[in-house]
């Protein structure tokens, strides 16, 4: 009987190659792999054609899905190669790590209720223990520092990934780890002690079952603890009395960029794309890598020739030779690429890092693998809509007039309601159109969020409906419920829409705060007006809108009396939005009631001047008041009897958003100009900041024209007048038409016309 402990670096292609070679030579009859014992049932899928790494075992508590952990595998992971060897040669493979039913329970006991647990299942770590945790998770950094390297991954890459002769490599790794464990202070935490005790238990169990050649693949740090077996009773005492919780597992796709995260067995690598290259092209001298870089640059329209590739490879080889290395590594290749291919531009090297060194590769898993119902429903929908999960950023333009595109939009909007931000809505080309621009990027953590929301329903539609109804029930303000309704309308959830509208009706009837009503009306009007693009019934919502607007028309005039400047500014914003809302709904009775409300505000002597001025402006824009009535209101607001500060505030409200009124309307210009000229010097100095604020809102061109107009009057020049089209003589105008048409090339010379102008 023989037991072979193979200490490896997780996700190391050199370790993976060494494990594969060792197992082919040893031909063991049992393989034990560091990993969650709950994953044993998943190993039967390891050779399924649709299970393509990078993938991960997702383990979670069904009662607390957020308490979860991932065990990722890449093609170049030593554990994956061990699993594949076992499946190919009909050798039993078992995971030997501490079962998560114990580990999750233990971690829950260690975490305080206030702190909770991280999504990776790792309990919060106190600051003084961070260094200890780093020591046993990445002990290679100490060896790297001793060898003059700045990090463990670069040292491992140089010493193992590029190493030609790996005879007795596992003995060397074990010896190095023993020295580290003896030299470093004793910083083993209880979780690690339990894990190593259970690994030894699994080795003893394999021995009792009669296996003769047992291969044990584990993280290098654990190798010494498994080579020297303590007494069995000591391990049994350590494991005795552990509590359990329920745990479920499944396979999920993983991504190379997520391999840098310390999850599961705590391993993370910085260069998964590079390691993928090393695994598939172990004898590459840099030529294949630089070819990949050139292909990447050409896809981005960056000129790169064969000569660039040759010179970059030569430079990388020269750098390796100067540093006493047998082969160019990633550092040398990066420096050569920066100098030759990137022209010294670090931003291009960052492109190489993202696309090649890290890479956005994502794995696939069979759809038949058992999963929680909601996750299964989401994945089936992804497959039906031909929207595969992709690690890279993907732009998606949807035309909602096409049934497939509409279904995709509904699907993405429903996921957003569950706080699963796979898709980010970038731009909608105008209100009421049929275009949506999305940006998609899948993250493995979304699987956990989907599972976590599974308690709301087994299908996406059911889960979103129940979740939204619960959110609406807990919401205390109209703004929150209105925001939910805006998101629900494009998700086409009739039951949720009805629940939200009923909730809005109840809150609107109970509130006496007119500002709350003003805040939500624009979004509700948009939903009412454009919801029918998705064939959603909005009759109920329209009725509530009309009732809310009627309440606003009654309550708004008193709300504009005796308020401070900040409240007045807020109300003017709402007035603008509500005017647009009423124009959008286009209901004559509603529009008339709104104009009457604005007139009450404009005529109220105690209304805030800013609000009164802006109300007058809205009435003028809608042509509700004629020019004579407008001039009378202007004169009254700017009369000597009025407070100069109130007059300035009234002007600010009237001119809000546009200075063209002063430029084009000579009568208004004269009124404002005369008022400014008649101000006493103390009043002028006091009002100057307010006037500057008013004019700062105008565009640069408007301010320039106003200044020129004021200078002309100061210099005694006649101001440039705007053409009054009502004073034109039609007969004289008609005589000029032939010349104009000839200049435009629309009529031959000498041909006149008697047609009316």
Image: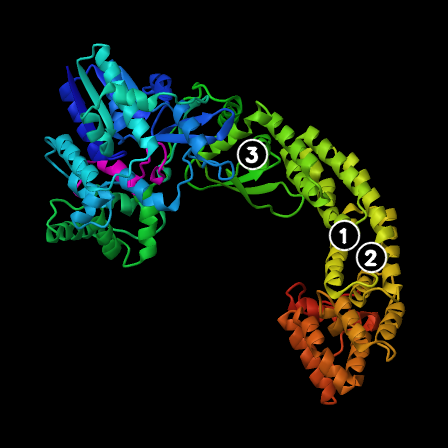
In the depicted structure, whether residue 374 falls above or below residue 614: above
Task: Give the distance between the C-alpha atoms of the residues marked 2 and 3, in whole angstroms.
Answer: 40 Å
How many C-alpha atoms fall within 10 Å of the one at disc 2: few (<14), some, or many (≥20)? Answer: some
Tell me the element at label 2.
helix
Is residue 672 within the magenta segment? Answer: no
Report the magenta residues as a range: 259-285
Is residue 283 within the magenta segment? Answer: yes
- Quadrant for the N terminus, please: top left
Q: Name the residue under label 3.
A: 415
The answer to whether any part of residue 91 appears in the image is no
In the rendered structure, the answer to whether residue 35 lies left or right of residue 592 reads left
Colour theme: rainbow
- Quadrant for the C terminus, please: bottom right
Task: Name the mark nearer the viewer: 2 or 3.
Answer: 2
Q: Mark 2 points at which residue?
A: 559
Task: Name the mark nearer the viewer: 3 or 1.
Answer: 1
* Pointer 2 or 1: first along the chain: 1
The answer to the question of whether label 2 and label 1 lie on touching residues, with beta carbons closer than 8 A, is: yes
Residue 517 location, x and y as percent?
Answer: 77, 48
Task: Give the distance between the C-alpha atoms of the residues marked 2 and 1, in whole angstroms.
Answer: 9 Å
Tell me the element at label 1.
helix
In the rendered structure, the answer to whether residue 634 lies left or right of residue 421 reads right
Residue 756 location, x and y as percent?
Answer: 81, 64
* Pointer 2 or 3: first along the chain: 3
In the depicted structure, whether residue 710 falls above or below residue 58: below
Tell me the element at label 3.
helix
Mark seen at residue 515: 1
The image quarter containing residue 539 is: top right
Q: Camera-side residue: 79 or 383?
A: 79
Mark seen at residue 574: none
């Amino acid at each position: 009987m023989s037991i072979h402990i193979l200490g490896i670096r997780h996700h190391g292609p050199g370790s993976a190659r060494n494990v594969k070679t060792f197992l082919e030579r040893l031909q063991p009859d049992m393989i034990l792999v560091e990993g969650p014992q709950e994953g044993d049932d998943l190993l039967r899928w390891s050779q399924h054609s649709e299970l393509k790494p990078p993938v991960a075992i997702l383990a979670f508590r069904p009662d607390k899905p957020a308490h979860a952990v991932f065990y990722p595998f890449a093609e170049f992971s030593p554990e994956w190669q061990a699993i594949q060897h076992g499946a190919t040669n009909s050798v039993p493979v078992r995971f030997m790590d501490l079962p998560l039913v114990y580990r999750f329970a233990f971690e829950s006991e260690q975490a305080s209720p206030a702190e909770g647990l991280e999504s990776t299942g790792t309990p919060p770590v106190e600051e003084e223990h961070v260094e200890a945790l780093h020591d046993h998770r990445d002990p290679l950094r100490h060896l790297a520092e001793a060898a003059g390297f700045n990090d463990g991954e670069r040292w491992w890459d140089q010493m193992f990934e590029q190493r030609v002769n790996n005879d007795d490599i596992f003995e060397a790794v074990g010896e190095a780890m023993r020295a580290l464990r003896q030299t470093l202070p004793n910083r083993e935490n209880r979780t690690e002690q339990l894990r190593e005790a259970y690994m030894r238990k699994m080795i003893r169990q394999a021995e009792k079952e009669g296996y003769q050649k047992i291969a044990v693949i584990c993280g290098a740090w654990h190798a010494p603890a498994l080579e020297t077996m303590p007494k069995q009773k000591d391990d049994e005492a350590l494991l005795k009395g552990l509590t359990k919780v329920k745990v479920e597992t499944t396979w999920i796709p993983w991504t190379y960029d997520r391999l840098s995260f310390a999850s599961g067995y705590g391993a993370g690598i910085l260069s998964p794309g590079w390691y993928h290259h090393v695994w598939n092209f172990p004898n590459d001298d840099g030529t294949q890598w630089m070819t990949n870089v050139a292909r990447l640059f050409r896809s981005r329209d960056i000129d790169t020739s064969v000569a660039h590739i040759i010179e970059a490879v030569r430079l990388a080889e020269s750098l390796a030779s100067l540093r006493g290395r047998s082969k160019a590594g990633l550092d040398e290749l990066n420096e050569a690429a920066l100098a030759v291919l990137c022209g010294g531009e670090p931003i291009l090297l960052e492109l190489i890092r993202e696309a090649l060194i890290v890479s956005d590769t994502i794995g696939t898993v069979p759809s038949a693998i058992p999963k929680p119902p909601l996750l299964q429903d989401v994945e089936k929908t992804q497959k039906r809509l031909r929207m595969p999960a992709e690690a890279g950023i993907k732009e998606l333009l949807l035309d909602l007039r096409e049934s497939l595109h509409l279904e995709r939009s509904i699907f993405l909007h429903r996921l957003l309601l569950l706080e699963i931000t796979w898709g980010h809505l970038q731009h909608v080309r105008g209100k009421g159109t049929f275009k949506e621009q999305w940006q998609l990027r899948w993250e493995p953590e979304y699987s956990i969020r989907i599972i976590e929301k599974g308690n709301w329903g087994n299908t996406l539609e059911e889960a979103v409906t129940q979740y939204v109804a619960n959110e609406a029930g807990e919401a205390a303000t109209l703004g929150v419920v209105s925001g939910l309704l805006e998101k629900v309308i494009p998700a086409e959830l009739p039951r949720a829409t009805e629940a939200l509208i009923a909730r809005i009706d109840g809150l609107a009837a109970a509130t006496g705060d007119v500002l709350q009503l003003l805040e939500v009306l624009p979004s509700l009007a948009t939903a009412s007006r454009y919801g029918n693009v998705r064939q959603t019934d909005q009759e109920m919502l329209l009725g509530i809108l009309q009732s809310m607007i009627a309440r606003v028309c009654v309550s708004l005039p008193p709300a504009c009396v005796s308020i401070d400047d900040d409240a007045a500014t807020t109300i003017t914003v709402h007035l603008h939005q509500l005017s647009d809302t009423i124009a959008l709904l286009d209901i004559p009775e509603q529009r008339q009631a709104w104009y009457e409300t604005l007139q009450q505000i404009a005529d109220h002597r105690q209304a805030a001047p800013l609000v009164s001025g802006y109300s007058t402006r809205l009435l003028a824009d809608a042509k509700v008041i004629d020019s004579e009535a407008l001039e009378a209101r202007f004169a009254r607001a700017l009369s000597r009897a009025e407070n100069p500060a109130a007059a300035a505030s009234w002007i600010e409200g009237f001119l809000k958003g546009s200075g063209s009124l002063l430029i084009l309307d000579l009568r208004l210009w004269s009124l404002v100009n005369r008022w400014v000229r008649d101000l006493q010097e103390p009043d002028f100095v006091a009002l100057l900041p307010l006037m500057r604020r008013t004019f700062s809102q105008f565009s640069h061109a408007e301010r320039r024209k106003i200044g020129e107009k004021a200078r002309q009057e100061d210099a005694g020049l006649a101001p440039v007048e705007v053409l009054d089209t009502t004073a034109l003589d039609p007969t004289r105008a008609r005589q000029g038409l032939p010349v104009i048409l000839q200049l435009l090339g629309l009529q031959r010379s000498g041909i006149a016309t008697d047609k009316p102008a």
